[in-house]
Image (cartoon, helix red, strand yellow):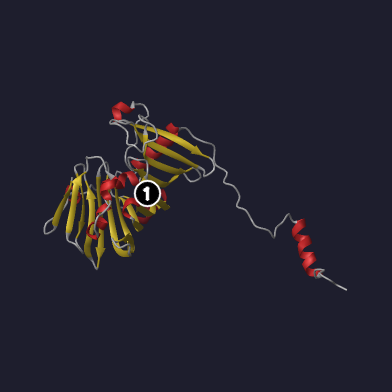
Amino acid sequence: MQGNRLPPFVMLLASLCATLGGCCGPQTEKPIIAPPPISLEEQVSRLTRWAGSFPRLQAKTVDRGVTIKSRDENGQAHTDYVEGALLIRRPADILLVGLALSKRAFDAGSNADVWWFADRYQTHTAWIGDARAPVEFSRLRSASSEMRLSALRADLVLDLLALSDLPDLHKPPAAQRGRLLTMRVNDVAATNDLWIEQLPTTPAPAAAALPGAARLVREIIVDRLTDEIREVRLYDDAGVLAVQSILTHYAPVTLGEEGEASAAKGPRFPYRITINYMVEHLSISLEFATVSVPTEPFSDAAFQPNIEGLKVIRVE
């Protein structure tokens, strides 16, 4: 009489699993072994050298390499695909162009004085604002679908790519518009998390943790295993995450006019970038086919808004 006795092959399998230390059970991932920590000064030095590798940058996406996801006022999701080109000239100049059917669908740009977003495909409207004024993230929230894409403020791009200057560790915050820099060494995630904080110059908002305390305005998350920037986060006055960039697929860029011959020695840049605008429920992703650091300077005209024939909305 066998009763509930297991078949011999099942008993053998169970015995083998027990002998091998539970190989048939759930597998757990091995913990990340983070490299030894480095100092804040060393991390800032590395980021500064990396950003300095791109005094100017020119990139072109793959076909339909710009993906824009948004929601209208009714909550309906929309996804649009265009081809794109990006120009950067540090310290302040940006131009992102979206092309549909070989025609310019939109352009988002900024220089030291103004930022703009021009929709040349649907609304034929340009939004223009002061690039020198502090960003008020609450004003990125649209009241209508006409403003869906106006959140693409190009003056945020350098911050989101970690290409803007960091606070100087050797200068007091008072000499840097109240900005200071600290770092959290995260051994669990194997990252260095740089915090750019702002000391209050006016009474702190009600949502601030402590009156008079510095508030986090930007966070740069560096992968300690690869020494590459994983993510950049921008926070509003209440300390809520407002805009996030995710940087992946790093690869060498082309230097000058040398073409592929220079790729192996070029600095590494993220060939896939996703920017999420939390307050706008909008995201834009770029997948680049080519990225280069040209030797020839860009024309100043590339970084000036061309608003001829467009309805213009001034963002105060």
Question: As drawn, which residue projects farthest toward the bottom?
Answer: 1
Position of the N terminus by quadrant: bottom right
What's the residue type where badge 1 is placed? Gln
Position in image of residue 273 (x %, y %)? 37, 54
Question: As drawn, which residue projects farthest toward the front?
Answer: 206
Q: Quadrant of residue 79?
A: bottom left
Question: As drawn, which residue projects farthest toward the left?
Answer: 309
Q: Which of 55 and 152 is in front in this view?
A: 152
Q: Is residue 65 above or below residue 275?
A: below
Question: Is residue 295 visible in this depiction of the protein?
Answer: no
Q: How many other residues sit within 10 Å of disc 1, few (<14), some (14-19) or many (≥20)? A: many
Question: Is residue 71 visible in this depiction of the protein?
Answer: yes
Position in image of residue 167 (x %, y %)? 34, 33
Position in image of residue 202 (x %, y %)? 28, 31
Q: Is residue 139 above or below residue 105?
A: above
Q: Nearer the viewer, residue 217 or 56?
A: 217
Report the side of 190 relative to 90 (left or right): right
Position in image of residue 275 (x %, y %)? 35, 52
Position of the C terminus by quadrant: top left
Residue beneath label 1, please? 244
The residue sitting at 42% across, 33% down in the picture is: 182
As helix, strand or loop, the secondary structure at mark 1 comes to: strand
